[in-house]
Amino acid sequence: MPELPEVETVRLGIAPVLEGHIITQAQTRRGDLRRPFPKDFAARLKGHKVKRLRRRAKYILADLDSGETLVIHLGMSGRMTVQAEGKAASKIGTYVHDQGEGLSKHDHVVLETDAPARILFNDHRRFGLMELIPTETLEKDKLFRDIGIEPLSPRFSAKHLAMSLAGKKTPIKSALLDQRVVAGLGNIYVSEALFRSHISPKRLAGSLKTNEMKRLVPAIKKVLRDAIKAGGSSLRDHARPDGALGEFQHHFLVYDREGKPCKLGCKDKVRRIVQAGRSTFYCPKCQK
DNA sequence: AGGTCAACCTGAGCGC
DNA sequence: TGCGCTCAGGTTGACC
């Protein structure tokens, strides 16, 4: 599922029942996701307060008062759902009835907080991840040490991107998917940003001109901001923690539109090609 | 060093 | 109804 806008949507959705709250219970319902859960995972969560809930790249980070950070990655199909009652339910603007013990077989982690609320982590493909890492050394951890700039940071500029891409011989599509270059972009938003800046996905990253960088960077920021406002894109798996679907899929200009007319009205059709094993959608006429 | 590709895992959709 | 194939929002480790 999730690229930056979906991860941010999930973060915002669980924040009201997690940030500032104590994790009263934690349960893993199998031994692993992409990797085994950390040793004593549940015990290291239980009784601790979440001081702050933040996001870095496609990771949700819950800083605990124990000095550790709970690191959550949703992989391709990860979802988080909040079940709350009373005061907590009004906070998240919904009321999901307690489904009793009716957990599905892919509800792999259950967290309970003193909101009170229950948060389910569901991930049928299990490409997701949960780790506990000392907050102090988080940035030096293998997971984060090579991650690039946050695209919504003011420091992410045409100049910055030009530096990162200088000399790169990989196609711009693949370069933007590389989390070491920019953090949080994925297959949907790269296609959309390239279309919106009229740049061909096949162009070699190092060959982009200054004026093209000056179109690309604002296009990336705008598409991400618009998608966050829309609650992300719901294709198959993504839903907000309150159960509502994201809406940004209705605003796709190229993604998943193979064979359909170009939305710039050029009379050509959207093409699908495969780059580095992933689908890319673009208009050969409008993107040079 | 930089770049490409298969593998990880389950489910949905499609053609037959 | 069912089988087999393809594809899916990500990351990573092995390989040129």
Image: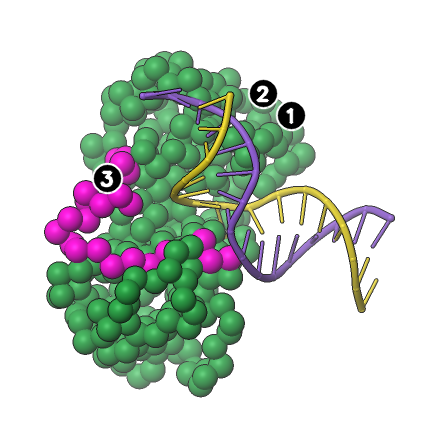
Chain colours: A green, B purple, C yellow
Magenta span has A127?
A: yes
**Mark 1 burial class by Cα count in 10 Å: few <14, some 14-19, many 20+:** some
Q: As shown in the figure, which amino acid type bears the numbered disc 2?
A: Lys
The image shows residue A31 at horizontal and vertical percentages of 40, 66
2 or 3: mark nearer the eye: 3
Q: Image height check: is A143 above or below A24? A: above
Element carrying mark 1: loop
- In space, the residues marked 2 and 3 are separated at their CA atoms by 39 Å
Residue A242 in view: no
Q: As shown in the figure, which amino acid type bears the numbered disc 1?
A: Asp
| Closer to the camera in the image, A57 or A9 | A57
Badge 2 and badge 1 in a common chain: yes
Instruction: State the residue at coordinates (32%, 33%).
Output: A180
Residue tagged by mark 2? A285
The image shows residue A206 at horizontal and vertical percentages of 37, 16
Upstream in the sequence, badge 3 or badge 1?
A: 3
Residue tagged by mark 3? A145
Region of the chain picked out in magenta, as a range: A125-151
- In space, the residues marked 2 and 1 are separated at their CA atoms by 7 Å
**Mark 2 burial class by Cα count in 10 Å: few <14, some 14-19, many 20+:** some
Question: Residue A268 has which mark?
Answer: 1
Badge 3 and badge 1 in a common chain: yes
Instruction: State the residue at coordinates (22%, 69%).
Output: A44
Instruction: Determine whether label 2 and label 1 are within 8 Å by CB.
Output: yes
Magenta span has A189?
A: no
The image shows residue C2 at horizontal and vertical percentages of 79, 64
Q: Image height check: is A165 above or below B9? A: above
